[in-house]
Amino acid sequence: MRNAKKRHQIVIQTIPRTQSATGAAIAGTAVTFATVWAAIIPLGGEMNLMAAREEFGAGRLYAEATHRIEADYLAGVTPQMRIACSDGGPFSGRTFDIQSVNPIGGRKREMRLLVKEYRTSATP
């Protein structure tokens, strides 16, 4: 991937979780894990869905994913994390839950994340 494609600054966040006295999970305040430059590609078209299907297997995560994010490889990124965008670009203010983390080409130079856009009930 060329750096020209990595136009969006993203913040990879962890969400600490604790339990209440009744045992219910409580999400804590997001903590920054890393800030990196990335390419964000919507998976809206049939060609993108077909590519996701081929890469991740039919019937698995592609049905949940709304976008693909490609960035330099970073050890420790997991599906329990999320992505926040605040670079002033078209994705600014949007949040994505990570569905899967995969190295591109198996060499751990770059990674591909399948993500699902997180929307609150106030978001159309």
Image (cartoon, helix red, strand yellow):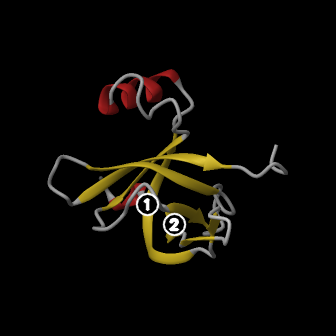
Say above or below: 109 vs 99. below
Seen at 45% across and 32% down, the residue is 62
- Residue 107, percent from left and from top: 14, 55
- Report the residue marked by disc 2: 10
Residue at position x 53%, y 61% from top? 83
Question: Could you say whether the residue bearing mark 2 is in a helix, strand or loop?
Answer: strand
- For the residues bearing labels 1 and 2, Cβ distance under 8 angstroms: yes
**Other-residue count near label 1 (Cα within 10 Å), few / some / many at <14 / 14–19 / ≥20:** many
- How far across and how far down the image is residue 34, in percent? 43, 75
Separation of disc 1 and disc 2 at Cα? 7 Å
Q: Residue furthest left?
A: 107
Q: Locate residue 75: give its quadrant.
A: bottom left
The mark tally for this picture is 2
- Amino acid residing under circle 1: Ala
Residue at the location (51% across, 77% down)?
A: 32
Q: Secondary structure at mark 1?
A: strand
Q: Residues within 10 Å of mark 2 (few under 14, many from 20)?
A: many
Q: Residue at label 1?
A: 38
Asked whether, in this view, residue 99 is left or right of residue 101, the answer is right
Give the x, y percent position of residue 47. Answer: 45, 24
Could you tell me residue 112's position as x and y percent? 35, 50
Marks 1 and 2, the one that precedes in the sequence = 2
* Relative side of 6 to 73, left or right: right
Closer to us: 5 or 82: 82
- View extreme (right): residue: 122
Q: Nearer the viewer, residue 14 or 21?
A: 21
